[in-house]
Structure formats: structure tokens, C-alpha cells
Image: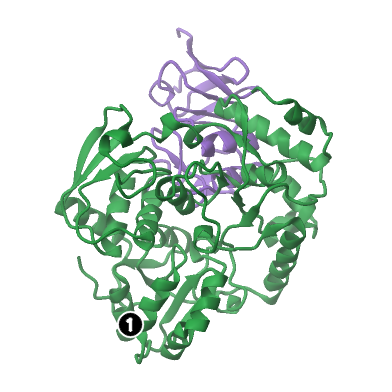
Chain colours: A green, B purple
Amino acid sequence: MRLTDTEKAMLGGDEGLAIQKAMEILVRYGEALGAERLLDTQNVAGYLIARKDNMKRRGTDSFDVLFSEFNIDSDEPFEFGRVKVPSCQMETDMEPDYYLLSGRTEEDKQLYERNMDWLRKLGVKPMCTCTPYQVGNVPVKGEHCAWMESSAVIYINSVLGARTNCEGTESTTAAMLTGKIPDWGYHQDEYRRGTHHIQVETPVVSQKDYGLLGYWVGKIVQDKVPVITGMQGGAANRDLLKHFGAAAASAGGIEMYHMPGITADASTLAEALGGNKPESLKFGEAEKRYAYELLNSCGTNTDVDFIMLGCPHYSIDQIETVARLVEGKKIKNGVNFWVFAAQPIKDLAIRCGYADIIEKAGGLLMRDCCPALGQFKPSGAKVMATDSGKQAHYLPNFTGIESWYGSVEECVEAAVSGKWGGAL
Amino acid sequence: MEPIILHGRKVMGGVVEGEALVTKETISGWGGIDVKTGVIIDLRHELAGASFAGKVLVFWGAKGSSGWSSQFHQARNNGVAPLAMVFNETTTKAALGCVVTRCPGVTGLDKDPTEVIRTGDWVRVNGDAGTVEILRRKA
């Protein structure tokens, strides 16, 4: 890799040990990719949450020691100091208010709060959401970012036209300390061009439809760049594209897609392809049913005891929808009705009165975290219903729970009756 | 046997010899492997239940969550990392994962390693030269 003089000095230790170690991992990583240089970023979203077992195994209670090893891959522990560029924390593995309900302990909570203090000291904004773009971090078209979290990566690359690869814990932490990331992949025009053309031949209107389309596209194109045309029905919006992308990134590894005229990079199919000769596929009724059945293949028991909403973290409009649906109803005894959002959105939901409505019905509005990431579920829960293709894909792997995928209306009906009655 | 040598590009340097574990499928890190044992836990994977600990992992590429590297990183800390990585598709996940696993890695080979190499073959991975050599076929 060719480094600038400033970068060479950073690597040489002129700016201290933390930046030197961060540069070392970035250079090793860049060379492994075959990248020719580093580029500057002013927008990093990563993951700096300590695991209790890693701390115990390492025999330390110092976040600096732990993250020197786990997040920078340094054999030599160092003091982190402050991050160099605007940085935020993605979703976490624990709910700080309702942790007891999923089997976490007071000790876990204390570690979590110390972790938040450490992030503040570092200058990492504890957004604690998989959707920083819903709480103020909205990259503009062409902005070079270094983000983790596959659902966020696909959203900002495609919908917003920002430029990031699906980074990892080590590369994002190094980017926070240096403001650098390898110039490779989706930072470059040629990688962003479409490789597959998906012609949609069935109405894709509801959030459930968008999730199914995303899941099918991910399954088919894996980690390539699909261009989707023929969308009919209502207009796309943030929440629909958020669910589409999360499902697509879970079923395959899609980090970038185009819906010409809707997403940021291209207005036409030809522009999205940029000269590539695509493989052509269609998404019709049969493909939609295939995705639906695949997503619903992890469940046989229709006695639901866990409703999971808010993957990716819900917007205020989605929380409003849930509040309207549950208003005046009662969640069945024994059914856990959990809705996940970023804390600023939860605060807004409280001001709007939605949190109160959901709680009166017997549900809980949760913040910061994600069951799949934290590998938790309500203690004793056996059967989940969710409106998220991503959560339906991952949570059974981690927790052995059965899962049903459907619309938010079907999820609320199941919450009230205790029975899954969803259908395509 | 005739020596079979595949030529490609260095991901990480170093030279090792060991037994190959081969899959034509992509591998999930987070949610796909057990970091304590090195066993592939993705129930839908053709290698489900197999361990890559101490083996030359020959695979198509990386898929899934951005936690890929952190999972292989922890596998290394737990002493159950692969001996080397040989893969077809370079992604940020596979590249960073190989770097923090600190094992020799090779990609961009002139023949598809998941086709030429079979599970159980004894291979030498030369990360510095970007080569993979099949020394002995599995009996």
C-alpha cells in the first residue's frame, strides 16, 4: 500500500501508541484486501461493547486492555485516548432497563454502565442502535464511511448513496482512532455497478412484501449487486427499504443494491448497470411464496409466547402504527410483547404517548439492543412471531426458538390471541 | 503423485502445512461458528458439525454479519483457529478475518481450490508466495 507522509508518521508512532497500533491493523487489512491506499473518513459506526466472559478470560477489568486486544488486535495494551473523527456505537447486546427479563444479571448491568462511561470518555456517541441514520447520523451521497452492521451498511450505501464496506469491529475501531479506512470495494464506482437485474412481477407494497423480496434477492444473488425494477403499488419509504435491506443482507451478504429512481446512485436501469451485462431474474408469486415458506420453515407450534418488533430498530412512525393497533387491547397473559428502538426514538414515543399505550396493553418498549446480537430471548420463550425477516432468520440459530414471519398486524393479532394465524 | 501447485495472491504471509477442510459454500462467522471449539454450527451448512481448528480451511468466501472477523479473532484467542485460509472471493469480512486470525492466507488462485483440493488432503500454504501445494492426497 502507498501511504502518505502523514500516514507513515502515524504508523511510525509520531501520534502515540494507540494510533500506531490502529494504523498497523489498517495496513495489514488493506494489504490483505489488495487495496492500494487508505482514504479519509469522518463517519465511523462500530462496536465497543465488552463481553463479561472475554474480560474474565483476559483477567482484566480495563476496557483499554480488553479492546486493545479484541478491537485493534494489538499484543501490547494501550490507552485509547479520544477518537479522531465523529464516531458512534451501534446496537448493543443488552437491554439496560429490562435485562432481568432475559436472564441477565445486576453484574451485567454494572459492566454495561461502566462501558457506557468509557465510550463517553473516548468520545464515541452511544447511539446504541443498528439505525444511526434514524437518530441523526445520515450520511450524504458520496460520503466515505466506515460502518458495521449489515442492515445499516446496505441502507446507507443504497438508499443514501454513501460509501462503505461491511466493516468489522477491528477496522471500525481503527478508523475511529485514525480517520482512515482502506480504499477498496464499495468506496469505488466499479464495485457499485449492478450485476443482476431483478424484474418484479408481483405487487410489492407492504412491509411484509418488502421483507420477502429482500430475503429472496439475498438468497439468489448472495453478495452481488442487484438492480430491482418493476416496483409497483405505493411509493417506497425509509421503513420499507430498511426492512428490505435487512432481509437481503441476512439471506445473502448484499451490501449494495439499486432501485433506479428510488435509491441514490442511479435513475435508470442502464445507469445502475454502468455497462455491466447482468444476469436477469424475475420475482413473481412463486418466488414470493418460496421466500415466505423459507422464512417460516423454523416453526410448527402456533402457540406464540414472544412477539419481537423493531428489527431493525423501529422508527417513530412504526411505533405509532403499533400503538394504534394495540390501543384498547390486551396482550395475552404469558406473551412477551417487545418493541425495540433507539433511545432517542423511545424518548419521542414517550412524548407522543405511544409508549404509554403499548405498556397499557401489556407490551414493553425497549432500547439499545437486539435479541439476535445479544443472543437472548424472554426467559422460557419457545415460539416467536416477528415482522422482521432478519430476526426470523437469525434468532432460531442462536436460541433454538421457533419463529413465524408476518405483518405487524398479524403479529399484534397473535399477541392478543396467543395463536399464530399468519398467511401469505 | 504429480505435484499440484496453485498460484494466487497473498492475503497474509507465513508458511504452514496441514490437513485441508474444504467447502464450496460460503461461511458465516457470527452465528456460523462456535468460537470455543472451532466447529461450524450453521445447521444449513454442508460442514455443519465439522471443526476447522488446526486445519487449512479452504472455502468459497465469507458471508453474513459484520461480526465475521471478531468471531475468528476469538477462535484464535481460544486456540481453535484454522491453520490457514484459502478462499476464492475476497470480501472485507474474509480479509479482515484472516488478518486477525493471524494465519497464512491466499486468494485469487489460478484454479478453483474448492474444486482441486479435497477434504483430508495434506497441503502446504505459502502466504508469502501466494501458493497452495497439494503434498499428499487423502488415501
Q: SS for tag 1?
A: helix
Judged left or right of residue A94, residue B24 is left
- On the question of residue A212 being in view, the answer is yes
Picture quarter containing residue A107? bottom right
Q: In the image, what residue type sits under mark 1?
A: Leu
Judged left or right of residue B66, residue A191 is left
Which residue is found at the position 70% from the left and 65% from the top? Answer: A116
Image coordinates of residue A104 in percent, x first then y, are 61, 73
Which residue is found at the position 27% from the left and 39% from the top? Answer: A268
Image coordinates of residue A36 in percent, x first then y, are 59, 24
Which residue is found at the position 29% from the left and 76% from the top? Answer: A409
Foreground pick, A316 / A400: A316
Picture quarter containing residue A12? top right
Indicate the quadrant containing the N terminus of chain A: top left, top right, bottom left or bottom right.
top right
Pointer 1 indicates a residue of which chain?
A
Give the vertical position of A69 relative to A354 (above or below).
Answer: above
- On the question of residue A294 being in view, the answer is no
Judged left or right of residue A16, residue A7 is left
Pointer 1: residues within 10 angstroms few (<14), some, or many (20+)? some
Indicate the quadrant containing the C terminus of chain A: top left, top right, bottom left or bottom right.
bottom left
Judged left or right of residue A329, residue B70 is right
Give the vertical position of A226 relative to A45 (above or below).
Answer: above
Foreground pick, A234 / A8: A234
Image coordinates of residue A45 in percent, x first then y, are 59, 52
Image coordinates of residue A4 in percent, x first then y, are 70, 26
Residue where numbered disc 1 is placed = A325
